[in-house]
Image (spheres, grey):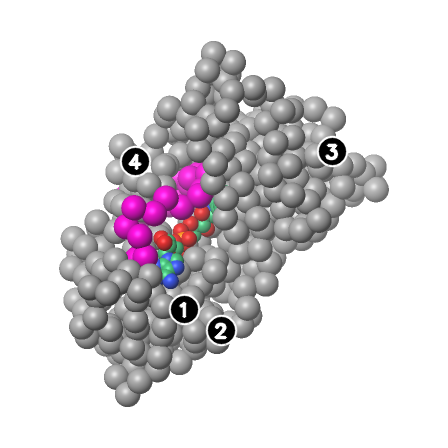
Amino acid sequence: MRFDVAVIGGGPSGAVAAAELARAGIPTVLIERNLDHVKPCGGAIPLGLIEEFGIPGELVEKKLSHMRARSPKGRIIEMNMPNGYVGMVRREKFDRYLRSEAERAGAVIVEGLVNTIRRSSFGFTISTLNDKVPPIEAHYIIGADGANSKTADELRFPPNELKVIAMQQRFKYTPELEQFRDIVEIWFDGEVSPDFYGWIFPKADHLAIGTGTEDRRHSIKELQKRFIEKIGITEAPYLDEAAKIPMKPRKSFTAEGAILVGDAAGLVTPANGEGIFFAMRSGKLAAQAMIGHLKHAEPLENYETGFRKLYAPIFFGLEVLQYVYYRNDRLRESFVAICADDDVQQITFDSYLYKKMVPAPWSTQMKIFSKNIYHLVKGS
Ligand SMILES: Cc1cc2nc3c(=O)[nH]c(=O)nc-3n(C[C@H](O)[C@H](O)[C@H](O)COP(=O)(O)OP(=O)(O)OC[C@H]3O[C@@H](n4cnc5c(N)ncnc54)[C@H](O)[C@@H]3O)c2cc1C
């Protein structure tokens, strides 16, 4: 089987890349190890993504504009998003839909675990562990195979350095859990996570509750158990899921004839662990760069340069925020206190919804700056 482009991995990044390429008339194969795979994920996506990719309404189970941040001492800050919402999707349906869009656009979908990738005179030869799939040849490769990317290993990309281990459990609604049905709750609490946060995300028929840490001295199972106890849940979950979140872009995610997208490239923002938006945006930008390369001999590197230009400030800002405020409970207490400020909330939500750094008026910036200094000094 021969194609211009092979996309390895059929999650959001790979499915979007394959759809974009196929729409441009480029012979494309999408190789997914398991078409029934359910990616462990909270499934929270911003309004901007829903609009840009035309996500059908029935896939967005909840549209939540009400949030709650909880500090280590139990202080609760209520927040409202007047101009938008966080959408909740279920990855088993969401990924299937995105792959079906790629297929509809003309991409060939193949099921098989990619085992080896060799450079050849054609470009690349890809073998899977599925006996029924013959070796696949492609001029170019897009590696969209997640945090433990086989593509990156085989083609010797620089390592994915920073990986949070995250665990999530799903609980059916009970009368006690009804209170969480229409609100996103975030816990900043060292007992729940020493360097990240815990989340309670409501779905149509269950709550997804999880936490994460990159500190290997802590057992993720223990942190999750403590979180569930603190919430006061006594019922057993009906599903446990866990996976890594790579929260630092690789030093480089473009090589000769091959590019990485989404988690494979490490494109999840620090502090909030948001990856679906960046997976889909990087898939789209990668495909556009590939189309420019194939049709107009433009450099493939345009993809990485373009991505960094658009999003490096957001990654940097959130890295600083996580470094400064997630270090201990006193600082986390200060962080939650800052979230009470209306201007902070507005800037945060405006930036989250459309991933644009929204410049605030000078006077507001000064006010927020002074509050930060006050709370930092207090927290330290
Ligand atoms: C517990 C948890 C909660 C999260 N919550 C959120 C959230 O609420 N919001 C958010 O925005 N992000 C969240 N994330 C991050 C988000 O899930 C990822 O950033 C996103 O899924 C990345 O998409 P992707 O397509 O790059 O990779 P993935 O979704 O990981 O898809 C990779 C695909 O490649 C396939 N694959 C892997 N290896 C091979 C191989 N060798 N051959 C063929 N196929 C292969 C896999 O089966 C998979 O389908 C969360 C992550 C975790 C772990």
Q: At 60% from the left edge and 39% from the top edge, which residue is drawn? A: 221
Instruction: Read off the residue under disc 4.
Output: 59
Q: Is mark 1 within 8 Å of ligand 1?
A: yes
The answer to whether the residue labelled 1 contacts the one labelled 2, judged by CB atoms less than 8 Å apart, is yes
- Disc 2 is placed on an element classified as loop
Report the Cα–Cα distance between label 4 and label 1: 30 Å
In the image, residue 41 lies in the stretch drawn in magenta: yes
Instruction: Read off the residue under disc 2.
Output: 157
Point out which mark residue 333 bears.
3
Q: Which residues are magenta?
A: 30-54
Identified by mark 2, the residue type is Phe
* Whether residue 359 is visible: no
The answer to whether the residue labelled 2 contacts the one labelled 4, judged by CB atoms less than 8 Å apart, is no
Residue 147 drawn at (x, y percent): 48, 58
Residue 30 drawn at (x, y percent): 26, 61
Q: At 43% from the left edge and 22% from the top edge, which residue is drawn? A: 172
Point out which mark residue 151 bears.
1
Q: Residues within 10 Å of mark 2 (few under 14, many from 20)?
A: many
Report the Cα–Cα distance between label 2 and label 3: 39 Å
Quarter holding residue 144: bottom left
- Sequence-wise first label, 2 or 3: 2
- Sequence-wise first label, 2 or 4: 4
Q: At 76% from the left edge and 41% from the top edge, which residue is drawn? A: 328
- Sequence-wise first label, 3 or 1: 1
Q: Position of 199 compared to 214: left or right?
A: left
Comparing marks 2 and 4, which lies closer to the viewer?
A: 2
Point out which mark residue 16 bears.
none
Residue 168 drawn at (x, y percent): 51, 37
Question: Is residue 119 positioned above or below 56 on the image?
Answer: below
How many numbered marks have been drawn onto this rendered protein structure?
4
Question: Is residue 212 positioned above or below 74 on the image?
Answer: below
